């Protein structure tokens, strides 16, 4: 049987060559500072990629997706004690920035068709918390949420929708790119994401003045004066002109990355079809970016996700459990959690789910090996 020569990884950076050209340009022009021509161009090119004809979009390149989320929470006007209804099954970075501003997270359960926020549970949460300030919505693993329902509910309840599209760059719902639905959207260029700047993020706004305000906060909240004048608390959140060059090169290959990720998903779907497992689901009106391919093991099955995790690890293959729901995290003990069904959907998916290697440099031979190792668990 084929044995891989190195560890098969979940998702690692893939560079192409254009990246270094833009980085070199920053060096040649001695523009190594934060801000600069690569940042400006990267924002313009990203917005150009995302833009739908029907609305204007502004981008602000930042040092991380998390800093973009923080600025989105500030722009939404979240203050001490304000309620923010948050996706429950996600990475903690989605919801931590609510705490930075003293807001209170109330977690909303997932539905089974996309694993994202359940509109029915969201409606229930609004009934309980009509004073809700904002909704923090994630598109998990690059799978779009039920946007028609969620945008309608947010609008009706007068809450600001923030879209955490950190994992979902290039994914679409009914032909519209994720990150462009909410009043504010964010994307991440962390090393494991579909494209990367080694570390970085971008805030997306619909209004120029929101982008200007976020820029002000991200550059130490320096007022317009010859001396250093400060009337608000600021942050140092800008992206460096060097790494923005990496992003410009990566953006040229984003659609190709998405296609390769989809091919990986399809190969898993076919390769695992006779086993008691299911792939992470998506709606037919959406185009996921298939950032990570995931499986859930059928409920009645004796094989547990940690059995597969351990077996893969022994075979030098990286896998990872599904994001552990936020309402189960000790740090959020005491926070309310709203679900539509009697049983928690998030807890159920977490108890049976596993993320599989989805690195676009993985060869077919390597992926077949992963599939064979999974089969050997049953
Ligand atoms: C990666 C990620 C973030 C954070 O992005 P960083 O750029 O790493 O700060 C936020 N939310 C989700 C869902 C993520 O996967």
Image (cartoon, rainbow, N blue to C red):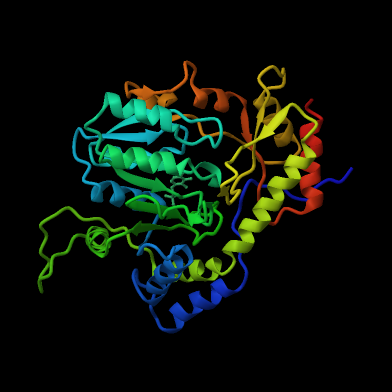
Whether residue 108 can be seen here: no
Q: Give the tally of numbered discs.
A: 0
**The quarter of the displayed image where residue 301 is located:** top right
Q: Residue at x 50, y 49 (%)?
A: 167
Q: Quadrant of the N terminus?
A: top right
| Residue located farthest toward the right when viewing the structure as drawn | 1
Task: Describe residue 246's horizontal placement relative to residue 215 as left or right.
Answer: right
Location of residue 230 by image quarter = bottom left
Specify the quadrant of the image occupied by residue 224.
bottom left
**In which quadrant of the rendered image does the C terminus lie?**
top right
Front-lying residue, 121 or 349: 121
Residue at image position (47%, 33%) is: 89
Indicate the position of residue 274 as horizontal and vertical percent values: 80, 31
Q: Residue at x 52, y 34 (%)?
A: 323
Query: At x 56% / y 34%, what residue is drawn?
Result: 113
Question: In the image, is 105 to the left or to the right of 137?
Answer: left
Q: Locate residue 117, reporting x and y percent.
A: 44, 34
The one of 336 and 200 positioned closer to us in this rendering: 336
- Compared with residue 154, is residue 38 higher up or lower down, i.e. above or below? below
Residue, far bottom: 29
In the rendered image, residue 96, in percent from the top left (x then y), is placed at 35, 39
């Amino acid at each position: 049987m084929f044995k891989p020569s190195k560890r098969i990884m979940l998702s690692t950076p893939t560079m192409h060559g254009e990246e270094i050209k833009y980085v070199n340009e920053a060096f040649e022009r001695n523009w190594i500072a934060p801000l600069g021509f690569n940042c400006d161009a990267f924002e313009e090119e990203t917005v150009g990629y995302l833009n739908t004809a029907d609305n204007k979009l502004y981008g602000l390149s930042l040092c991380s997706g998390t800093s973009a989320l923080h600025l989105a929470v500030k722009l939404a006007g979240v203050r001490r004690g304000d309620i923010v209804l948050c996706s429950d099954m996600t990475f903690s970075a989605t919801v931590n920035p609510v705490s930075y501003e003293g807001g209170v997270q109330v977690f909303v359960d997932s539905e089974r068709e996309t694993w994202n926020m359940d509109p029915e549970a969201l409606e229930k949460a609004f009934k309980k918390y009509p004073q809700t300030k904002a909704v923090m919505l994630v598109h998990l693993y690059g799978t779009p949420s039920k946007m028609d329902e969620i945008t309608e509910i947010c609008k009706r309840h007068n809450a600001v929708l923030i879209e955490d599209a950190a994992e979902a760059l290039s994914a679409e719902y009914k032909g519209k790119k994720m990150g462009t639905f909410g009043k504010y959207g964010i994307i991440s260029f962390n090393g494991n994401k579909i494209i990367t700047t080694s570390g970085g993020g971008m805030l997306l706004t619909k209004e120029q003045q929101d982008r200007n305000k976020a820029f002000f906060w991200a550059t130490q909240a320096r007022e317009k004066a010859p001396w250093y004048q400060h009337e608000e608390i600021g942050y140092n959140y800008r992206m460096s002109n060097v790494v923005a060059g990496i992003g410009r090169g990566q953006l040229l290959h984003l659609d190709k990355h998405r296609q390769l990720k989809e091919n990986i998903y399809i190969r898993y779907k076919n390769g695992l079809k006779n086993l008691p497992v299911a792939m992470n689901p998506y709606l037919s009106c959406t185009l996921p970016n298939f950032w990570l391919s995931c499986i859930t093991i059928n409920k009645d099955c004796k094989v547990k996700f940690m059995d597969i995790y351990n077996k893969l690890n022994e075979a030098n293959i990286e896998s990872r459990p599904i994001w552990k729901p936020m309402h189960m995290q000790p740090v959020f003990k005491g926070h309310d959690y709203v679900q539509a069904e009697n049983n928690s959907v998030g807890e159920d998916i977490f108890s049976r789910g596993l993320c599989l290697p989805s690195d676009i440099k993985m060869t077919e031979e390597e992926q077949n090996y992963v599939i064979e190792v999974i089969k050997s668990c049953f």
